[in-house]
Image (spheres, grey):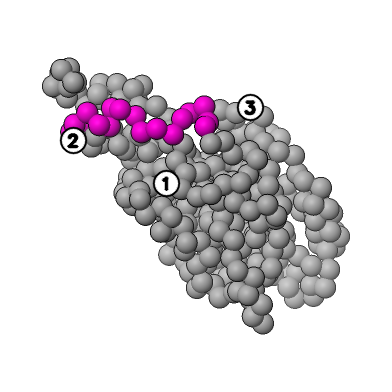
């Protein structure tokens, strides 16, 4: 490429602008995906752009931009059923998303950490496991700089085998700092019949308490747990007053945190947030606690 020396002689800011326009958005996938919403030949394409093959210097300067613009496609792993047959359910130290590590081993870890956009599909034809979904969220939070997650409609039917860890949620919210990075999770599909039925059951089990429209997850990177769902989304008709009192305490902290979080003015009055796809709406938010400034300083996509 005869113009390469001229390109490399440009000021860094100008060079980055050139790379931004020259490096196309690509989709990255490493799993077998049977979801009807998944496309083998998406409009963005899957081929590695030729600019990354020019020379080593151009590659090193463009690879962060390539991955920061790329869309990672992931499916939650389906855990074997025997894991949930134990009396106390699966251990919190058991990582249900561990099989994702070898699947994405082709991609260097430092490259994954530039990923900001993820689409989650399903690799099975029946309902996914809620615990596996939450473990997948943890894997993404641990291995990428994800900012937006987009779900296919099948991801909105999640069957939970064990209870939300209410005690851990209570401890986390009781000592929770008001600093966290929000990860926005979108859907373009209306709530499924199953989910609407489940919401109706939850409202009865809450005994007059309000079920929020927006599902909130909390995640602390140095914690051994997967993202913790707002326990109001896991109440049961046979929950005693002691458990519901703890649910109320966690809910007060979550509602206060949501009201005071500086990023939430980005949300529209109806709970949605503008995205590149106007038919999407905000479905969930995962707050990654204690990472605002650290995230900004250590996950810059620019060389």
Counting labels gives: 3
Based on the picture, tell me whether residue 25 belongs to the magenta stretch.
Answer: no
Q: Which of 179 and 187 is in front in this view?
A: 187
Residue named by callout 1: 145
Q: What element carries label 1?
A: loop
Q: Which of marks 3 and 2 is in front?
A: 2
Span highlighted in magenta in the image:
41-58
| Image-based side of 213 in relation to 131, left or right | right
Q: Can residue 4 be seen in this snapshot?
A: yes
Quarter residue 19 falls in = top left
Residue in the image at 69% along x and 64% along y: 160
Q: Can residue 216 be seen in this snapshot?
A: no
Mark 1, other Cα within 10 Å: few <14 / some 14–19 / many ≥20:
many
- Measured in 3D between alpha carbons, the distance from the residue under mark 3 to the one under mark 2, in whole angstroms, is 39 Å
Residue 60 x %, y %: 23, 37
Residue 56: give its label. 2
Residue in the image at 44% along x and 34% along y: 46
Residue in the image at 47% along x and 66% along y: 223
Between disc 1 and disc 3, whose residue precedes?
1
């Amino acid at each position: 490429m005869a113009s390469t020396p001229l390109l490399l002689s440009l000021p860094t800011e100008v060079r980055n602008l050139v790379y931004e326009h020259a490096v196309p958005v690509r989709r990255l996938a490493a799993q077998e995906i049977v979801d009807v919403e998944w496309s083998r030949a998406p409009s963005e394409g899957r081929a590695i752009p030729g600019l990354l093959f020019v020379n080593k210097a151009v590659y090193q300067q463009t690879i962060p931009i390539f991955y920061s613009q790329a869309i990672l496609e992931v499916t939650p792993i389906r855990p074997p059923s025997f894991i949930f047959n134990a009396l106390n359910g699966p251990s919190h130290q058991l990582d249900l998303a561990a099989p994702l590590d070898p699947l994405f081993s082709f991609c260097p870890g430092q490259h994954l950490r530039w990923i900001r956009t993820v689409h989650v599909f399903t690799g099975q034809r029946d309902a996914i496991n809620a615990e596996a979904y939450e473990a997948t969220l943890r894997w993404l939070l641990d291995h990428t700089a994800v900012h937006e997650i987009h779900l296919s409609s099948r991801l909105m039917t999640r069957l939970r085998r064990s209870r939300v860890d209410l005690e851990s949620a209570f401890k986390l919210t009781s000592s929770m700092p008001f600093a966290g990075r929000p990860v926005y999770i979108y859907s373009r599909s209306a709530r499924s019949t199953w989910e609407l039925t489940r919401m109706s059951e939850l409202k009865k089990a809450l005994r007059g308490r309000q079920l929020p429209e927006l599902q909130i997850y909390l995640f602390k990177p140095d914690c051994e747990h997967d993202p913790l769902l707002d326990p109001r989304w896991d109440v049961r008709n046979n929950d005693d007053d002691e458990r519901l009192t703890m649910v109320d305490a966690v809910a007060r902290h979550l509602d206060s945190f949501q009201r005071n979080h500086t990023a939430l003015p980005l949300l529209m009055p109806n709970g949605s947030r503008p995205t590149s796809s106007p038919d999407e709406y905000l479905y969930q938010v995962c707050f990654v606690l204690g990472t605002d400034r650290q995230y900004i300083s250590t996950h810059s996509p620019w060389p």
